[in-house]
Amino acid sequence: MSTDSFYDTNASFDTENLDMSNNGLKSISPDMLNILSLNCCGIIKKLQYPEFENLLRSHDIICLVETKLDDRDEIKLPGYIFRFKNRKKIAKVKSGGILLGYKQKYEHFIEVIDTGSKFVFWFKISSKIMNTDTDTVFGIVYIPPEYTSYASWDAFSQIENEFLDLSSRYKFVSLVGDFNGRTASEKDFLILDSHDPSNNFSDLIENSVSILDFLDIPRERKNRDIGKNKYGSLLLDFCKGNNCFILNGRINGDKEGKLTCRNASVVDYCISNVNFINRFCTLEVVDFSKLFSDVHCPLSISVYATNVDGCEVPDYIEESAERIRKWDSDKLIEFQQNINQGKIKDLLYNLKKPRVDVNVNIHVEKLCEIFIESAKATFGISHSKNGKTRQKSFMNKPWFNRECKFARQNYRKFRRKFKKKSNYSK
């Protein structure tokens, strides 16, 4: 496939179910999936209040951060299932921690995605619920405040690396949580100078931003918080570099950009990649209550979905599933010889074109496909009775991860070169 096809207006964005109304979507179904995002500042004490329990029960999916739990703790709420990513396994002083909860009826449609970063907890929702062609991925984010003992300037890089990896496999990706980043009303997208003869990216960047126009979502987001910090700059850079948009201050329910923390700042966000933004219906900043959190307001988010009662429970037990046989170091040379050099040349040709796709994942994915073809030819395939395709063992090899990381890093250097030439205002 030529890289030119990536620049087609409809190539990466499905407009079939869109209209030009305020919500930007023709309702396939009246059903909604209600998601709660909140920094609860310790969940155990909060569960003592009926008001807090009612808040949880009014949502289908619960995303809580700074839960202050460890692996010995157990949270029970009848009718709900909980999964945890605790900062420490066992600790006298508990801090941080991310919790995912969902109604029991969604048990077969929601799956946790295990990753290494302690700053984000990923899960995916079945395409049968979201009424999409692929599963939808959400990341629950908690980044500790700047200038604290838990602060990490590497947090956004870790989240971005995992975001890039998941974006190569899933079309719809969103982030919610406490980023501790103040962004004021600054742009979360790039506007490149179309008059600059050295700029080959203006068409692509404008294509992404124009989707907001198509959905009748304002380019300029409102924000009552006029302050900005370093984490806020990193968050804006993340959005600019990954075709993501902040929904606070933009969509129904919060078009004025309400404050989310201490009645003084906005640090709790809902962020969506460009493909998924049309699925959001409302984002509401719930009024602050000390029964919910020490300083944060809950975010109540609704997205278009299908009634779970009308969905069939997925059957994970199949008679057989194809998988690549175990990596054999003795066949390394044979593996290298089986790599399709013609496809490698085509990939290099597309990468060297003046107009390079802004999403390096497309090229990395093609490279992975070439490796997988070689692995099948070298090691052969087998069939697993449990029906779940196992992760390809050769993809865990250091050299494979190193090559993929090298590709992403060099692309980011290439992207920063053009950022410096960017005009950040219309």
Image (tube, rainbow, N blue to C red):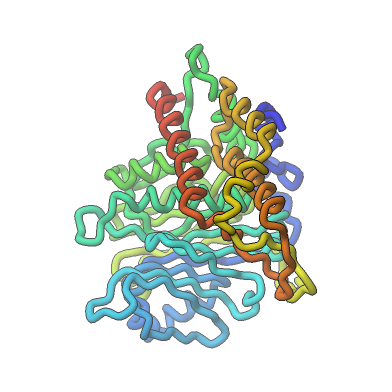
Question: Farthest residue toward the right?
Answer: 319
Query: Which of the 4 image quadrants contains residue 5?
Result: top right
Name the spot of residue 139 as percent of width and height, x first.
49, 59
Q: Is residue 11 left or right of residue 194?
A: right
Q: Is residue 74 above or below residue 351?
A: below
Quadrant of image for the N terminus: top right
Q: Does the image show residue 145?
A: yes
Viewer-proximal residue among 371 and 73: 371
Q: Nearer the viewer, residue 120 or 24?
A: 120
Q: Residue furthest front?
A: 330
Residue 419 quadrant: top left
Depth order, front residue of 10/56: 10
Residue 127, horizontal then vertical, whole percent: 69, 61
Please tell me which residue lies in front, 286 or 269. 269
Q: Residue at x 39, y 56 (%)?
A: 268
Q: Is residue 401 left or right of residue 327?
A: left
Image height check: is 196 above or below 238? above
| 258 relative to 350, above or below | below
Determine the residue positioned at 29% across, 49% down. Answer: 153
Look at 74% across and 68% down and name the residue there.
383
The spot of residue 263 in percent (x, y) is 30, 58
Residue 349 x/y as whole percent: 62, 25
Q: Is residue 123 left or right of residue 240?
A: right
